[in-house]
Image: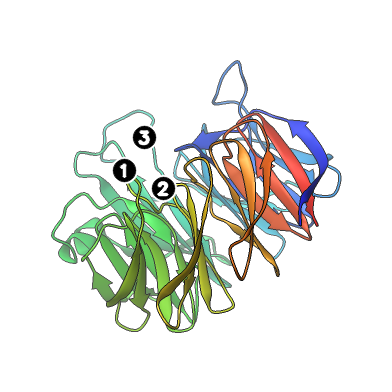
Amino acid sequence: MGLTESWTIESNIRLWNDVAATATGEGLLYFTTYSTEYENNGSVVAVDVQDGTTEWEYDKPAEVIFQLEYVDGQLYMLDANGALRVLDAAAGTQDWALEVPYSSKSGDDEPLWPGNISVGPERVVVSLLDINSEEGYTYTYAVNKPEQRVDWEIEHETVEEHSEYSYLGPEGLSPIVDGTVYVAFNRATMSVDIQDGTINWSQDNFPASGPISVADDVIVMAGGSFLQILDRASGDSLWSVEGTAPQGPSFISEPVIADGRVYATARDTEVYAVDLQDETTIWTGETGGEIRVGPAVTDTAVWAGSRDGRVYGFEKESGTKLASELIGGPIVGFEYTSGTLLVLTGESVVAFVTE
C-alpha cells in the first residue's frame, strides 16, 4: 500500500501551537491562512478535495482561528476574539455569530481567547481561556443554536471547586454523546449534562493535555505523559498508556477509536494501537519526528504526519510499516475523507490517494 499524489497547492497556513485548524465536509477541505504583509489578515479557505480548486474564501475575523468544525452543512469556528461564528459550509457565507458574552479580566485592549467548541444538535459547547488574566480565568458555556444565546455557563469559581489548582485552562472537549459533553481543563476533567450544565462528575487526578474521544463505556484522552482511559459513568481512571517524550506532554492530539481499539499519535515520535478490551498495547510504529496531529484511520491502514516532514503508513492490524512519503516540511494538519489523505505543512496542502 502506498500514496499517489493527486494535487498540491501553496498557501500560508495559519498555525496555533504549531498545528493548523482544519475540517472536512461537503467534499471540501477547510483551513485558515495569513497574509505575509500582516498576519491579522488572511482567510478561511475551502478547497475541493478532488482537485484542490478554491471554492470560496471568507475574510478571517481575527488573527487566529482556534478550531473549525463541520456539522450538517455548517462550518463552526472559534476565533481569537472569543467569537463563535457559523458559516454556510458550501457557500462560505455567514449564517450567524455570537461575540464572546463575557468581559476580559486581563485589562488588555485585545484579549486573547483560546479555547474549544463541541457541536451538538441543539447546542454548541464553548470552553474559553482569558489567557492574559492573572488567574487564567476560564469560561465554559452552551450556546442555543436556534436562538443564538447562552443557555447555561459553568463559572470559573465552580471549576476551581473541583480541583486543587487555580490555573485551569481548557485543553479539550469531547463530542456530545448521549446528552453529555466531557470537558478537559489542564488540571480537571468533568462530565457535563448538555441540557442544563449540571456537572455529573469531576476528576483532578492527572493533567489533561488535549482532546477527548468517546467509546461505549470509556473516554480516552491526552493526559500529559499518558494516554488516559476513564470510566464514562464515574470518571475513574481505569488504566493508561505511558509515552516517552523527554520533555513536555507525550500526548496532545485527538485519539481515534475504531473497531475496539484506540489509535493515537505522540510527541515521542510513536504511533500507538491499543486494545480497549484487554488493556494492551498491540503495536507501536516509529516515525522520525514528534507528531502533533492525530492519526487518520482507514479500513486497512493508520496514517500519521510527523514533524520530520514525512507521512507514515502502518498496517492497521499488525503495525507493519507500509509507507514513508517525504512531503518536505513539518506536518501541521491531517485529514482523511473519501479515500483522499490531505496533508498540510506551513506552506502547502498536498492531497494523496491511498492505495
Task: Indicate the quadrant where residue 160 lies.
Answer: bottom left
Alpha carbon distance from label 1 to label 3: 33 Å
Task: Indicate the quadrant where residue 277 lies.
Answer: bottom left
Task: Indicate the quadrant where residue 203 lies.
Answer: bottom left
Q: What amino acid is found at the position of numbered circle 2 in the picture?
A: Asp
Q: Is residue 52 left or right of residue 39?
A: right
Decide which of tag 1 and tag 2 comes sooner along the chain.
Answer: 1
Q: How busy is the neighbourhood of tag 2: few (under 14 within 10 Å), some, or many (20 plus)? A: many
Question: Dots 2 and 3: beta carbons under 8 Å?
Answer: no
Seen in the picture, residue 120 relative to 83 is either above or below; the reply is below
Closer mark to the observer between disc 1 and disc 3: 1
> Circle 1 sits in a helix, a strand or a loop, which is it?
loop
Residue 246, which numbered label? 1
Seen in the picture, residue 285 relative to 65 is either above or below; the reply is below
Q: Is residue 29 left or right of residue 174?
A: right
Question: Dots 1 and 3: beta carbons under 8 Å?
Answer: no
Identify the residue under disc 3. Answer: 111
| Residue occupying the point 29% across, 82% down | 234
Q: How busy is the neighbourhood of tag 3: few (under 14 within 10 Å), some, or many (20 plus)? A: some
Decide which of tag 1 and tag 3 comes sooner along the chain.
Answer: 3
Question: Dots 1 and 2: beta carbons under 8 Å?
Answer: yes
Alpha carbon distance from label 1 to label 2: 7 Å
Identify the residue under disc 2. Answer: 268
Residue 289: x percent and y percent? 49, 40
Seen in the picture, residue 199 relative to 271 is either above or below; the reply is below
Decide which of tag 2 and tag 3 comes sooner along the chain.
Answer: 3
